Amino acid sequence: MGWYSSRVSELNERLNRASEGAPDTVKRALSDAIVKVGNAADQALSAMLDASERTSAGNLGTQRKWQERCATATADISRAFGDAAKDNMLSPALQLFWYQALEHEMAFFDSLAKVQTPQLHDDLLVHQDLLNKMLGELWDKWTFLLSKDVIFENDQRQVVQQVSRMAQSIVDELAPGVLKRTSEGVSRATAKSLDVALKLDDKLLGGIGVDLAKQLVSTLFDVDIPDEIDRNLLDAVQGGAEVYQVQKGHYRNLVSAYQSLVQAEKGSVLLLFNATRAEVDTYRDKNDLGKAKVMLDQAKGYLSDWASRVPSSAQRSEASSFKDKVCSAIDTDWRLTEELDNKFRDKFKGIFIQSLGSETLEQLAESYLFRQHLEEITRKDAAGKLKALPGNLQSEVDSALERGLRPIDDLVNRVPEEVRELARMKNQRFKEHVRARLKDRIQALLPAIIELAALWDPNNLSRDFSREELEKALR
């Protein structure tokens, strides 16, 4: 490569000036020594540059290789100068030349052996390797975390979908069903009174005399009809109450299952995610690009400082050329380090580094998606249907009673005038009694309806199926 050609020329020029009048044998011996010095220096510098260009995270120890080459060079150079002077008498001028040349060569390589550039270059490559490995490991971990998180969120979504189906069932079946059962219960309960009423037509009552007619009318309203109504309506109401209790139990079981899944997600996926973020923070605190830049600047700075301090001008020229080649090798590795760091930032910004990004937060908590699910459930208005049910029940009962007891009203309007007032009074008392008993039954059912309606209130749904704990765990 001819690293040392300028220095060899410089030494030969000085030898020529110092050897004026000296024997040719002495000149040849020193000239041969200079050739050996040049070869030793060339070999050493070439080997050191090669070590710098070949160094990698799997091929470290560059500082040691430099020191070994410097030691070999100083030994070879010392031997070359020693052999040249061993059998030759040197004039004072040649002695001075010999001493200065040897001293300068020793200084050149001794000081080069102490430069920390190769160690810092190795350190930079270790930093680069750690960053590269972390890139791969973090991507694998992030992929794993997302896959585990999807499992939890799919399970949570299935729970919410069951809640949605419950809401639809309330709207389509439960609320209309209780009205239908109540109406049917009233119809069954009034059937007995209708059977009796149909037998007591106006012709029968008109032909038996007033006293007997009054007796028959009283019998009509004194039969055990209220108890019959009670039993039939109790069946309808009792069935409705059981349905509500089952619904409440099912809802609470779903809330418990959902919240258990949320806790499991927090204690596994999100815990690992936060721990990984903490590890990355610790790593980057110790190994960020700024610290690597310091290594780069120091590595180049130490070598530049050495090159500027070597004894002779020719050596400084050779040292500068060597410095530029080595720094070029370091710069190549630095550019790769920068690329890896930029890649790291681009890939994990908002995930493992810097503030948590909204996209990452949504990937891990899926707050927006679950909010949409809850809004869809709210739009079904199960709470509204349940809240309206008590009023609708009373209205349905009144309508059913009106229909069921209309034949008796018709009968009252047809009975002979002598018993009509009695029939009206008995009929009115009968209706009031029946309505009171029905009202009591309905009132007994209301707490279950109201409690179930409260469960389906949008605010309650938002609390029971909240993503707030997951978001807090990530902030």
Image (cartoon, helix red, strand yellow):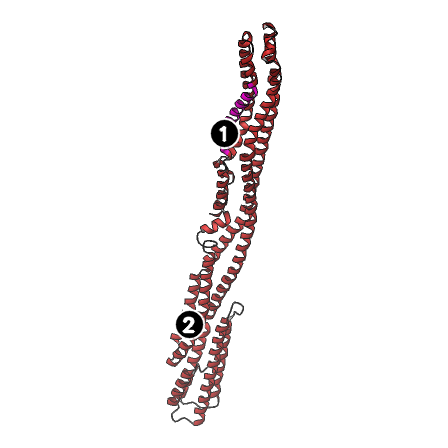
SS at mark 2 in the image: helix
SS at mark 1 in the image: helix
| Dot 1 crowding, Cα within 10 Å, few <14, some 14–19, many 20+ | some
Residue at 46 percent across and 51 percent down: it is 359
**Picture coordinates of residue 254, whole percent (x, y):** 57, 39
Which amino acid lies under the numbered mark 2 shown in the image of this protein? Leu
In terms of depth relative to the viewer, which is nearer, 354 or 259? 259
Q: Nearer the viewer, mark 1 or mark 2?
A: 1
Q: Is residue 280 left or right of residue 22?
A: right
The relative height of residue 239 versus residue 8 in the rendered view (above or below) is above
Mark nearer the N terminus (1 vs 2)? 2
User: Would you name the residue on which mark 1 appears?
Assistant: 388
In terms of depth relative to the viewer, which is nearer, 31 or 376? 376
Q: Rounded to the nearest whole Å, what is the CA distance between mark 1 and mark 2?
A: 87 Å
The relative height of residue 417 versus residue 331 in the rendered view (above or below) is above
Q: Of the numbered discs in the image, which one, if any, rests on residue 69?
A: none
Q: Is residue 350 left or right of residue 425?
A: left
Residue 76 visible in image: yes
Q: Main secondary structure of the magenta part?
A: helix
In terms of depth relative to the viewer, which is nearer, 51 or 151? 151
The relative height of residue 31 versus residue 331 in the rendered view (above or below) is below
Q: Of the numbered discs in the image, which one, if any, rests on residue 303?
A: 2
Q: How many marks?
A: 2
Which amino acid lies under the numbered mark 1 shown in the image of this protein? Ala
Q: Is residue 217 left or right of residue 28?
A: right
Magenta region, residue range: 383-406
Was residue 320 drawn as part of the magenta stretch in this picture?
Answer: no
Residue 218 visible in image: no
Question: Picture quarter containing residue 30?
Answer: bottom left
**Picture coordinates of residue 352, whole percent (x, y):** 48, 54
**Picture coordinates of residue 369, whole percent (x, y):** 49, 46
**Picture coordinates of residue 94, whole percent (x, y):** 40, 88
